Image (tube, rainbow, N blue to C red):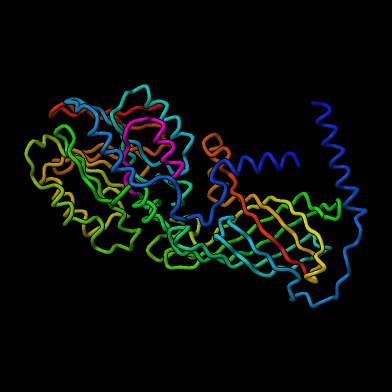
Amino acid sequence: MAAHGSLRASLVAALLLAAREARPEPAHEASPWYVPDHAAMQFAGAIGFLSAGPGWSFLDDTVEAALLVGWAPPALAGEDFFTFTLKGQWRPFLFDAAGWTVRPLMVGAMLTYTVGDDYFAGLPSRYDQGYYWFRTAIRPALLLGASAGRPVEALNLRFVEGYFELVATDYRLVQFIRNPSTVNVELFTLALGVKLRF
Amino acid sequence: MRVWVTLLLVCAGCGAFEFHPYELRGPHRDLHARSLERLFGAKPKQAFRFAVVGDMQLFLDDSAAAMRDLEQRGVDFVVQMGDLTEFGSTQEYEWGVELLSRLKVPFFVVMGNHDALGMGQKLYRRTFGPESFSFTYSGTRFVFFDSNSREYGFPGDIPNLQWLKTALAPAPAVMNTFTFSHVPPGNGDFDDALAEPLVKLQQKKGVAISFHGHVHQYHDVHAHDVRYVTTDSMKGRSYLWVDVDGTSVQVQRATF
C-alpha cells in the first residue's frame, strides 16, 4: 500500500514538474479572441450521438470553451434530439511522452439546451412558481476527463488531440447525492472525442 | 493513469454511452404485458396480496429499503403509484424498474406527472405500455389511468372518463374494483371540471378503493361510497399492502 502511495506521489510530482517545464508548443499567429482555434467532434456524452463545433483556448490551452451542436437520430435514440452545448474546461497539467502531449486531467462543466416543444426552458404558465425546480430543456453537467495529442504536419494542424470525458448530468448528480447506494457506479457516462487545433 | 483505466472499465460495463437524457433506448420494453403474462401464468389464487408503493422519485435508497421490507411480506404483485422518476429521464426509468424488479414478482407502474416530463410519456409507453389499462385477477378488477391533468395543461380529457366508463362497465364474476391514478381528485393538479364526474362515476360503478399518490402523505377517507387511499412517498417510509379474499378486502399500512 505504501509503495502504491509513493508511486502516486511521484506521479503527481512528475506531472507538476512537467507542467512547469513543458516545451512551448509551436507558435501560431495571434488571432482575435473570437476566432476559434480548434474544432471538436464528440461521440455520446448526453449531448447527441455526434456533436461538433468550434472551441477557444486560453492560457496555453489550459482553459477552454467550446460550443457544440449535437444530434441523435431516431434510429439510435428513438427520436430526433438536437442539443446546443456550452462547455468550459480546465486542464492544469501537461507532459510530453514519446512525441505525444498528454493532459492527464480535465475538469469542466457544461450547459446543454435541447431544442423542441417537449422541453421547457422557462416554467410554462400552467405551473405555479417553483412547481418544478429544474428545466427540462436546460441541463447542467460536470465533466472529468483526459486527452492526448500530437502535431500532424501533413494536415498542417498544430495538434490533433483525442479525449475522453466522464459526464455526470444533473439528474445523475442529484440522484447520486441523495441515493449513493442505489445510483452507485451509474453517476457517469462516457464521451469520446477528437479536437483539431489550428 | 490507473484511476482512469479503472473508471473507463467501470463506465464501459454499465451502458457507458448516453446520447440524450430522454433517449428512447435501453433494455426495458412492454413490462406490463410481461407482468400480466407472469401473473396469469402462475396458478390462480383465491386469496392474494398486493402492495401499493408511493412516489419514488428522489427517494431511491428508501425505495430499496421498501423492497427489502416487502420481501418479508410475501406479496403476489406490486403497484407503484407514479412519480417513479424525478426528471422523467431514461436512466431514472431504469433505476426505478431495477428497484421494482428486485422483488421477483410482477409489478405495475402508474404514470406520474414527473414521469411525463420531456419524452417521459413516450418513455412510459415504451417501458410499460399504455397509461390506461385494466385487468381482472381472481375476481378483482384493477383499473389504471392517467390523472395528471395539469401536466398536459388541463385538456379536458385527462383523466379520460369515456375510457374509464368502458373499463368500469359491469362484468360477471367481478367482486371488487380498484382504481389507480397518480393525482387524487380534488387536488389542484386534477382537472377541477372532472373531479365531481369522476367521483360520481366511481360511485355509480361500485369502485371499492381509489388509490393515489402525488401528495406524499398517507390519507384514507370515505367519500360517496368509495374509499380514497393516498400513499406516502417513499421518503415517508411507508407503503400499503392489501389482502383480498373474495369480497373481503383489508388495507394495511406498513412502515419500515
The quadrant of the image that shows the C terminus of chain A is bottom right
Q: Could you say where residue A165 lies in the image, as x and y percent from the top left? A: 66, 52
Residue B74 shown left or right of residue A100 in the figure? left
Q: Could you say where residue B61 lies in the image, as x and y percent from the top left? A: 49, 35
In the image, which residues are magenta? B94-111
Residue B139 shown left or right of residue A5 in the figure? left
Q: Could you say where residue A161 lies in the image, as x and y percent from the top left? A: 75, 60
Determine whether B47 is above or below A15 in the image. above
**At 31% across and 29% down in the image, what residue appears?**
B253
Q: Could you say where residue B22 lies in the image, as x and y percent from the top left? A: 47, 56
Residue A160 shown left or right of residue B206 in the figure? right
> Residue furthest toward the front?
A154
Q: Quadrant of residue A110?
A: bottom right
> Residue furthest toward the top?
B72
**At 73% across and 66% down in the image, what residue appears?**
A196
**At 82% across and 68% down in the image, what residue appears?**
A153
Determine whether B114 is above or below A57 in the image. above
**At 15% across and 41% down in the image, what residue appears?**
B207
Q: Quadrant of residue B46?
A: top left
Q: Is residue A92 magenta?
A: no
Q: Is residue B109 magenta?
A: yes
Q: Quadrant of residue A62?
A: bottom right
- Total of numbered circles in the picture? 0
Determine whether A127 is above or below B129 in the image. below
Which one is nearer the viewer's eye here, B6 or B54? B6
Which one is nearer the viewer's eye here, B7 or A171? B7
Residue A142 shown left or right of residue B227 in the figure? right
The quadrant of the image that shows the N terminus of chain A is top right
